[in-house]
Amino acid sequence: MNAAKKFEKEFVRNAGKRVRELKSTFKEIVQRLDGEAVHDFRRATRELQAIVDACSIRRPSRRVTKTIERLRQSRHALSEWRDTDVLLVELKKARRKARTKAERKSWAEIAERIVKQRRRALKKFCRKHKSLKVKAIGNKAKALVEERVRSEPMMDNLRRLLERSWNKWSGAIDDFVKKAAATELHEVRIKTKTLRYAIELSQKFYPDRELETASEWLKGIQDRVGAWHDELMLGRVALETFSETPRDPSAIKVIRDTKEKEIAMAESSRNYILSIRKMKDYQRLKRVLSASVYAMTNGRGPRDLENESITGPIQ
């Protein structure tokens, strides 16, 4: 078996594995209402979406767009459930730090509100889970992969996916530099995640230790900004909990302490992102990713690439 055929077979096999994970984790959610399965399912949708993105990067089509949109819908259908689970973990940490009975009572009221939100999210999912048609989505994604693999150079598609993911991530950083606001910071996190999944997909076929380390660094950025976003959501719920009643001193303290912590985390994330291009980890990621993209280039002479930039194809 030549290298091209072997790669095609491995690519289809990997897609099949992701589809099986998609179906099995969703089954766990439906049958057991398993919170951990929610996390695994959402990860499976992102991994499968990266594969579909790679297959469609040359020839986007309505079929591809619909498949990606259905994967997003399936993931978003579980967002509120996942968010409330995360908030309950953060709330538990905060409650342990409460110093007075009044503060603990305020946190208990917030917890009650989050539990109600979680219950509503579960009921909504149980009513509508069949309409998501997850099994059909998985089958369509696999069929699309099998079709595109036979007609397109997937190695070059992976290269294009890495380049596009880098450009979108870099663009999100630029947007945040221009406007350091909550929406732009959250978008940096989303694009960081997208780039990381693209790198992890390429790693399955062309493993590189340096690129793996760089991917772990991206995960650190994602977690840093994600922790800020979790605290932001907790602060919103705290404010909503006491929005319709006069606030006693303990409620004011809980809201104030939560917001103060969120602001500190936002400032830390902001300073980190604003200085990111000066970091050695960023420079190493750019260098290693550029070398990987160069190695995966198909159909162009090396001299043409060298004439574009001395630092490689990733800018």
Image (spheres, helix red, strand yellow):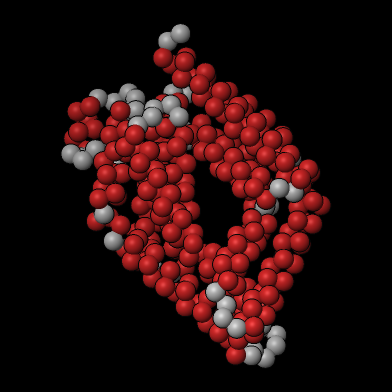
Residue 300: % across, % down: 29, 26
x%, y% of residue 69?
Answer: 62, 45
Q: Nearer the viewer, residue 66 or 279?
A: 279
* Extreme residue in the top direction: 1
* Residue 303 on image: x %, y %: 19, 28
Please give the name of the residue rendered at 35% of the width and 43% of the height, measured from the top-left corner. 214
| Total marks placed | 0
Q: Does 199 sit left or right of 233 as displayed?
A: left
Task: Give whichever of 277, 69 is nearer the camera.
Answer: 277
Q: Residue at x 49, y 59 (%)?
A: 226
Residue 49 seen anywhere in this rendered image of the structure = no
In the rendered view, would you say 251 is above or below 282? below
Relative vertical location of residue 109 with respect to residue 139 in this rendering, above or below: below
Instruction: Please provide percent x and percent y for residue 40.
Output: 61, 43
77 or 114, which lies in front? Answer: 114
Quadrant containing the C terminus in the rendered view: top left
Within the image, what quadrant is residue 79 found in? bottom right
Q: Look at 45% across and 60% down and name the residue there.
A: 225
Q: Nearer the viewer, residue 263 or 312?
A: 263
Left or right: 314 as drawn, with respect to 169: left
Q: Quadrant for residue 313, please give it.
A: top left
| Residue 276 appearing in the image | yes
Write the residue at 63% across / 34% down: 21
